[in-house]
Image (tube, rainbow, N blue to C red):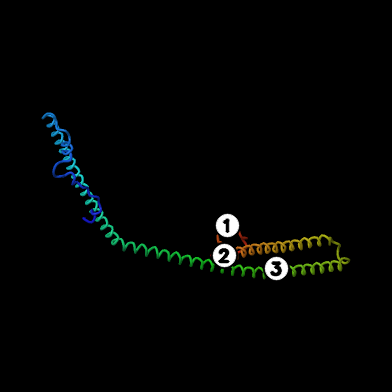
Amino acid sequence: MAAATAGRPQIDLAFLHHEGPSPFTSVVASQPEPNNRSEKREGLDHNDMIHNQLDDHTNLVTERQDETVGIYEHLDERLGAREVRGKDKDVQDAPSRDRLEQIFANQLDMKNANAVSRDELMAEMQSHHLQALNSIEQQRIVSEGVIREMAGAWRADHEKQKTEIIAAVKATANEQVPFNVQGYLDELSRSLATEIRMLLREVGELREEKRNLELWAFVFRSPHYDMRVLNDISFQPDRRVPHFQG
């Protein structure tokens, strides 16, 4: 406590306890002698009153100084107690703080691990999607070739049948009852036209499937690939194309 109060300013009250003749007395003494006893008495009374006032002020200042010292001592005690409590609290909170730091570190490790796992999963899903698209592309190419071969065979077969029918009709035209050969040929032409339209429609569907597959392949190979693009309502794959989900 002495160290705490050592740096504080001390009030020097020695001048209030001056021994010997008062400086005010010397001032009064230096004045001319009063002409009568009453004036001298008044001067002494005035000096006593000044001394009493000085004593009162001295006592008041002393009391205030004691109160100030007591306040400083009380503040020092509170400050010391607060420092002790702060140190004790730091010691008590150290395990909890260590546990929180460990929890934060574990959460950060889990977040990093989840990010790595998510990247690996996205890469694996993209690989599977690309494999499926490549397989569908191969199947489409094979199907296109088969349909072209079938269409060519159907056309050749129809042309052969038409030629044979025309030849047979011409060979037997003079031996059988005349009939409307042109109507028969028109019916045959309509049948052939129907078959050809069916083949052309299938070829158009294959072309549409090829376009959808190329669009899917473009999205998957894009460096900014995002699964949400394929789920966007503005892009709907053809319903004849299988929709793979990761």
Q: Closest to the observer: 149 or 156?
A: 149
Residue mark closest to the camera, 3 vs 1: 1
The residue shown at (57%, 64%) is 244
Q: Is residue 57 above or below residue 128?
A: above
Residue beneath label 1, please?
Answer: 232
Question: Which one is in front in this view, the residue at disc 3 or the one at disc 2?
Answer: 2
Q: CA distance from mark 1 to mark 2?
A: 15 Å
Residue picked out by circle 2: 244
Q: In the image, which is nearer the foreground, mark 1 or mark 2? A: 1
Determine whether the residue tagged by mark 3 lies in a helix, strand or loop.
helix
For the point 21% across and 55% down, which residue is it?
Answer: 2
Q: In the drawing, what numbered circle is on residue 157?
A: none
Residue 32 pos. (x, y %): 16, 33
Measured as percent of width and height from the top left, residue 196 is found at 74, 63
Q: Amino acid at mark 2?
A: Phe
Q: Which residue is mark 3?
A: 147
**Sequence order check: which comes first, mark 1 or mark 2?**
1
On the image, the x and y values in percent for residue 205 come to: 68, 62
Is disc 1 placed on a helix, strand or loop?
Answer: loop
Badge 3, how many Cα within 10 Å: few under 14, some, many 20+? some
